[in-house]
Amino acid sequence: APDTAMLAADVVSHAGTAAASPEVAAFAMESGLPGEHRGGFARLPTAPVGITSESAEPWADDAGAPTLLWAVPERAAPRRGLAGWALAFSIAGLLASLFVGWGFPIGIVGVVSAILALRRPIESRGVAVWALVLGVLSIVYSAGWLLFAAMQADVFG
């Protein structure tokens, strides 16, 4: 077996650099500007490559469409209906506040759900605005009933 140190000594020249192999051509210093085209590739390295032949197998089934094995399930559509519930609570609160003063919690639920419905882009804005107005009106009527009851009971002196 040849000595590896001898082979390494033959390859390295006296200056400490490796000698050029015969298949490597010396670089010509004719290009005047950096980046000037010196021949070689005719197309950009990012240009599309033409397809010469099909590499994919045809589908095994004769239906024409491939079967989806790993299909991602579709996202459920966001639910609407908060504005309708807000309107129902506001109407119920308004009806209750016309007769008794303790209907204001139903009106508060109607107002809060109407505000939440106004913040959602999929809800009906008209229904949500009506729910807000009727909910505030039910709270005002309830406050009027409670104020009337307090004056009748001489709570405020």
Image (tube, rainbow, N blue to C red):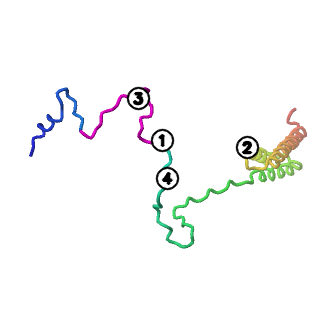
Q: Identify which amino acid the numbered label 2 is placed on.
A: Arg
Residue at 47 percent across and 60 percent down: it is 53
Mark 2 or mark 3: name the one nearer the start of the chain: 3
Please give the residue where the numbered disc 4 appears in the rendered image.
50
Question: Where is mark 3, residue-wise?
Answer: 31
Q: CA distance from mark 4 to mark 1?
A: 13 Å
Indicate left or right for 98 with 28 as reference.
right
Classed neighbour count for the residue bearing mark 2: other residues with Cα under 10 Å, few (<14), some (14–19), many (≥20): few
Task: Specify which label sits upstream in the sequence, 1 or 3.
Answer: 3
Residue at the image position 41 percent from the left and 40 percent from the top: 40
Element at badge 2? helix
Side of 24 relative to 149 (left or right): left
Q: Nearer the viewer, mark 4 or mark 3?
A: 3
The amino acid sitting under disc 1 is Leu
- Determine crowd level at label 4: few under 14, some 14-19, many 20+ residues with C-alpha closer than 10 A: few
Query: How far apart in space, not on screen, are marks 1 and 3 (Cα)?
Result: 19 Å
Dots 4, 1 in contact, CB < 8 A: no
Name the N-terminal-most of marks 4 and 1.
1
Residue for point 19% across, 26% down: 15
Distance between the alpha carbons at the discs numbered 4 and 3: 31 Å
Q: Residue furthest bottom?
A: 62
Q: Secondary structure at mark 1?
A: loop
Q: CA distance from mark 4 to mark 2?
A: 52 Å
Q: Which residue is mark 2?
A: 119
Query: Which residue is pictured at 68% across the width and 53% down the height?
Result: 78
Which residues are drawn in magenta?
22-46
